Image (cartoon, helix red, strand yellow):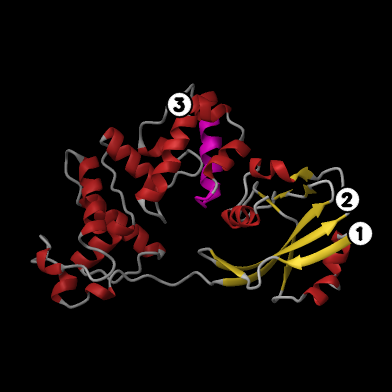
Amino acid sequence: MQQTQIAQGLPYYEAFINKYPTIYELANADEEAVLKLWQGLGYYSRARNLNFTAKHIATNLKGKFPENYSSLLELKGVGDYTASAIASICYDEQTAVVDGNVYRVLSRFFGIETPINSSQGIKYFKELAQTLLPKQDVGNFNQAIMDFGARQCKPQSPDCSICPLNDGCIALKNNQVNALPVKINKVKITKKHLNFIVFISEDGKTILEKRTKKGIWKNLYQFPLIETKKRISLKNFLMNDNFKKLIGVKIYTMTLFNDKEIVHKLSHQHLYTSFWIVNVDRLSNDSISTSKIHDFPVPILISRFIDAFDF
């Protein structure tokens, strides 16, 4: 739910818990099957971590889920926010949840200009939130302040006139509501030009490759990829050294599927993508039938092309 609405995410959640109703089904699941079910959500490392952690809990912890903040932090993929949320909501542990909504509420109400994504800010806001916890119903309090930030103390143009906290809000008093919270812009957006080679042989086969290196889309499948410094024409692409190395078969035709590059925006990079349709006489033994292409977990960028091309 970090980057999408409940209405869009709920079908994925329901499908996931129907497929894996207990920790044991998820622990026994193949990672590729988990990634396929997750396809379209992004943040694929979270799916891999869920699968890994389920195996750890089922095998090493005998199926017993950790019940306190410190033990939860030992799970792969679980950080302060997730551990605090589970520990407080499920077990009423005295640990504050600090998410984007909480940062916003606290920075505005107390008039704090320390950047929320600085090491100093992360520590300070966590300590401040911890001092505000009630002695009972910690989980309800944490959920309430997150919900308050989402519904009332919104990022843009909140209606401060009806806010129950407006009498004590320093940001409102000092006309800083739109200036807080402060965030350092650390993310440098890189621009990449991706060229996917969609082979199609006479006997209806194509090639998908598994991404095994660290980074985006790890363990997902894609068409053979050649990255270029800028958009490239067909003539120049045929002369590309990487393309020449890739091609070891007779080409009948080669066409560009999309006239304009498809722009796929991620948090830290923008991918300018072209899909090249290459008709060939035959393919190597590691090729797959195009009829099975929907069985493989792929990034949403590839999935949308597969649907558009109508294999």
Graded by Cα atoms within 10 Å as few (under 14), some (14 to 19) or many (20 or more), the crowding at tag 2 reads some
Residue 268 picture quarter: bottom right
Splitting the image into 4 quarters, where does residue 183 fall?
Answer: bottom left
Three-letter residue code for mark 3: Thr
Residue sticking out furthest to the left: 167
Q: From the viewer's perspective, tell me whether residue 164 is left or right of residue 157.
A: left
Q: Is residue 226 above or below residue 83?
A: below
From the viewer's side, name the closer residue of 292 and 227: 292
Image point (52%, 35%), residue name: 53
Image point (65%, 40%), residue name: 295
- The image position of residue 188, as x and y in percent, is 53, 72
Residue on which the image places disc 2: 282
Numbered range of the magenta stretch = 40-55
Q: Residues within 10 Å of mark 1 (few under 14, many from 20)?
A: few
- Mark-to-mark CA distance, 2 and 1: 8 Å
Please tell me whether the stretch drawn in magenta is mainly helix, strand or loop.
helix
Report which residue position mark 1 lands on: 250
Which residue position is annotated with label 3? 22
Is there CB contact under 8 Å for labels 2 and 1?
Answer: no
Q: Is residue 53 magenta?
A: yes
